[in-house]
Amino acid sequence: QVQLVESGGGVVQPGGSLRLSCAASGFTFSNYGMHWVRQAPGKGLEWVTYIRYTGNIREYADSVKGRFSISRDNSQNTLYLQMSSLRGEDTAVYYCAKEIGFKERPLGYFDFWGQGTLVTVSS
Amino acid sequence: EAVMTQSPATLSVFPGERATLSCRASLSISSNLAWYQQKPGQAPRLLIYDASTRATGIPARFSGSGSGTEFTLTISSLQSGDFAVYYCHQYNNWPPEGTFGQGTKVEIK
């Protein structure tokens, strides 16, 4: 069965950096794009970023563009999110999510999600 | 960017009753809409995509309808495991932006 396990969350000071990881199993990771979606405490969901199955195309929400960077290692079935210049409004649970579309046909929604990792930006 | 507005914010329903949740888009998104269910402390689960297609393993009591700007999720007979928060999500304008509604909490009456 599909499993997505995030790690790397924690408390970081404003302006700091953090790298999240998402270990994938139960499907052919290298055939699917992947997303990060976040949820601030007690709030709704916000799409953050996407990476194509090959890793050569990335998309970002305006709120994180220039500060966050998504990457992947298909040999290790792992997705990453490098976050820098962190702000209080970046405090959230970060979920990795599998793109439902196969290879060159991403559709922009998600059929499986991880359990999330909490990032708290606070001094 | 399409702004998604869900109503009501909270819906109180007796077990066994029907629940009807609404989602409105600020501009037409065709049928590019998904619904997710989220229980406390859990990740969201895909219920419906393309406005009306049930995801794999989703019971038939969940149904979606609508196109353009008006969408509905109906749960025909609420069971105890259905009490959760439901989010609509448009992907018509993705990339770069896919946007979620603010959620509807379905609670036991």
Image: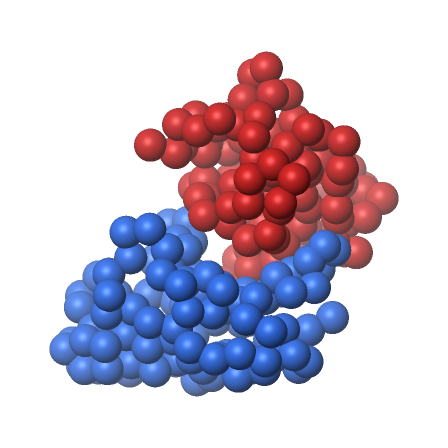
Chain colours: A red, B blue
- Relative placement, left or right, of B12 versus B89 is left
Q: Quadrant of residue A82?
A: top right
The front one of A94 and A53 is A53
Residue furthest to the left in view is B16
Image quadrant assignment for residue B19: bottom left
- In this rendering, the answer to whether A27 lies above or below A115 is above
Write down the quadrant of residue B69 in the picture. bottom right
Q: Which residue: 55% across, 59% down?
A: A45
Q: Nearer the viewer, residue B66 or A23?
A: B66
Q: Most extreme residue toward the top, as rendered?
A: A75
Residue drawn where x is 40% and y is 63% of the image = B53
Q: Residue at x 57, y 66 (%)?
A: B32
- Quadrant in which the C terminus of chain B appears: bottom left
Left or right: B41, with A59 as reference point: left
Q: Does A102 appear above or below B2?
A: above
Counting from the top left corner in percent of width and height, residue B12 is at 28, 82
* Horizontal side, residue A21 vs residue A26: left or right: right
Figure quadrant of the N terminus of chain B: bottom right
Above or below, A30 relative to A85: above
Q: In the image, residue A5 lies at what x, y percent?
A: 46, 31
- The picture places residue B84, in percent across and down from the top left corner, at 33, 65
Numbered disc total: 0
Q: Position of residue A100 (x, y in %)?
A: 51, 46
Residue B34 visible: yes
Q: Is residue A9 visible?
A: no
